[in-house]
Image (spheres, rainbow, N blue to C red):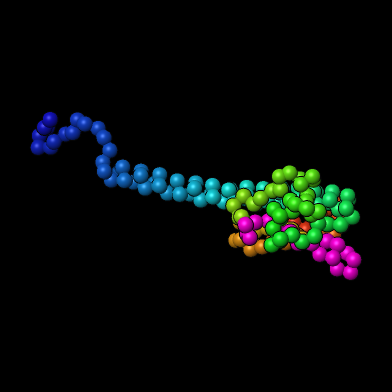
Amino acid sequence: MYYGMRKVRSERGFTLIELLVVIAIIGMLSSVILASLSSARERARDARRASDLRQVGIALEMYYDDHQQYPEDVSQERLSNLNDGSNSILPYIDPIPTDPIHTGQNGYRYRASNVNGRQSYSLLVKLDKNDGVWCSVSVLPGQTVWIEAWPACNF
């Protein structure tokens, strides 16, 4: 339709610029949401690691109550190797927990020590929060509030 010298559009719609602006805004919002989901996943994995190692600590204390010692060091210090022979903690925890993403040499670690007749053990874990640096928690026998050591790991 023409009114005078101007052409009047009778069709309604969005221009290309408007569509590109909306697409750019949606892209920016989705990247912010994905970034926040990533950090939530990291926190969830670290929370699972804390829970797993608390359960292992309880199992090791039950082992100590029955055997008056902690299991000896295991092959390659892997916690998953505490499942055979006299070192087995399977009666106390089954299955032995594994790290959500780190496996093999990077999975949970266990170290036993006996210094001057004082037995202890250390559990080692790589946290996402600490950029994969090993975090160690050492425990003495009969220490019932062993979770007090966790703040060193920034849980």
Residue stretch rendered in magenta on the structure: 104-120
Instruction: List the single residue furthest toward the left.
Output: 5
- State yes or no: residue 126 in magenta: no
Asked if the stretch drawn in magenta spans residue 114, the answer is yes
Name the one closer to the observer, 18 or 64.
64
Q: Quadrant of the C terminus?
A: bottom right
Q: Is residue 47 visible?
A: no
* 154 relative to 63 in the view: left or right: left
Point out the residue furthest to the bottom here.
116
Q: Position of residue 136 (x, y in %)?
A: 72, 61
Q: Is residue 64 left or right of residue 31?
A: right
> For the image shown, how many numbered marks are present on the structure?
0
Q: Is residue 105 above or below residue 30?
A: below
Residue 96 in view (yes/no): yes
Residue at x 84%, y 50% (from the top left corner): 63
User: Which residue is at the front of the view, 21 or 135?
Assistant: 135
Residue nearest the observer in this picture, 8 or 139: 139
In the rendered image, residue 44, in percent from the top left (x then y), is placed at 62, 47
**Residue 1 in the image: x percent, y percent?**
12, 30
Residue plotted at (69% across, 62% down)? 76
Height in image: 9 above or below 129?
above
Give whichever of 78, 37 is nearer the camera: 78
Q: Position of residue 15 (x, y in %)?
A: 26, 41
Say left or right for 40 vs 154: left
Q: Residue at x 21, y 31 (%)?
A: 11
